[in-house]
Amino acid sequence: MRVNRDRHDRGVAPDGSTWKELSPLTLAQGSRKGGPLNKTGRMLQSFHYQVANDTLALGFDGARDGKLAGFHHFGTDPYTIRTTHKAVLAFAGIVARRVNHPGLPQRQLVGFPDSDQKLTAEVTADHLTRVLNRVR
C-alpha cells in the first residue's frame, strides 16, 4: 500500500514508467495540487485494500472514484462531452455546447511488479520469523 501510494505521488506506473504529463489545456485550468491525478487527492485517499484468508484485493472506494480510477488506469478513447444542465460548457477559457475530448492517456494506478513481490516476500518472512521466535 505504502509503495503504491509513493508511486502515485511520483506519477509512476507499477512498471516504473512515468505517467504522461498533463495537457496544456488542463494546466491552463489552474488550481492543481500536484501532477496527474492529484488535483484534489481524493482518488488516492479512496485507494484501499481488503484481506480475506489468502486473498488480497486492492481497489477504490465509492462509485465515482472507482469509475474514474478505471478510466485513468486503462485510458479512454476520444469522446464528446455535451452539456446536460447548463447552456454551455466552460473549461480553460473554452466555452461551447459540446467538446471533442481527445481521451485520457493510460496512467496505471495499481499493479504488482517484481519489486513489490520481492518486498512482500521479505515482509512476510520477517513477520513469520518474529512469530516463530516468540513461540520457541
Image: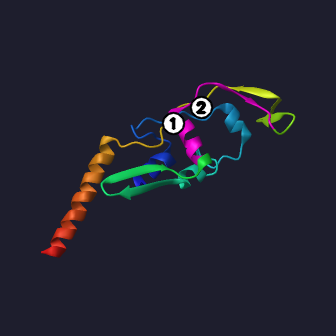
Name the element at disc 2: loop
- Residue 10 shown left or right of residue 95 in the figure: left
Measuring from the top left, give residue 103's x and y in whole percent: 62, 28
Q: Which mark is residue 133?
A: none
The quadrant in which residue 22 appears is: top right
Measuring from the top left, give residue 74's x and y in whole percent: 51, 33
Report the span colored magenta. 65-84
Amino acid tagged 2? Leu
Residue at position x 68%, y 38% in the image: 27
- Residue 78 shown left or right of residue 9 in the figure: right
Name the element at disc 1: loop
Q: Please check the rendered image and state whether residue 73 is part of the magenta-colored stretch, yes or no.
A: yes
Question: Do callouts 2 and 1 mark residues in contact (Cβ within 8 Å)?
Answer: yes
Residue 36 can be seen in this image: no
- Residue 59 shown left or right of residue 115 in the figure: right
Residue on which the image places disc 2:
104
Measuring from the top left, give residue 115's x and y in whole percent: 31, 45
Q: Work out whether 43 lies above or below 99.
A: below
Residue at position x 29%, y 51% in the image: 119
Residue at position x 54%, y 32% in the image: 75
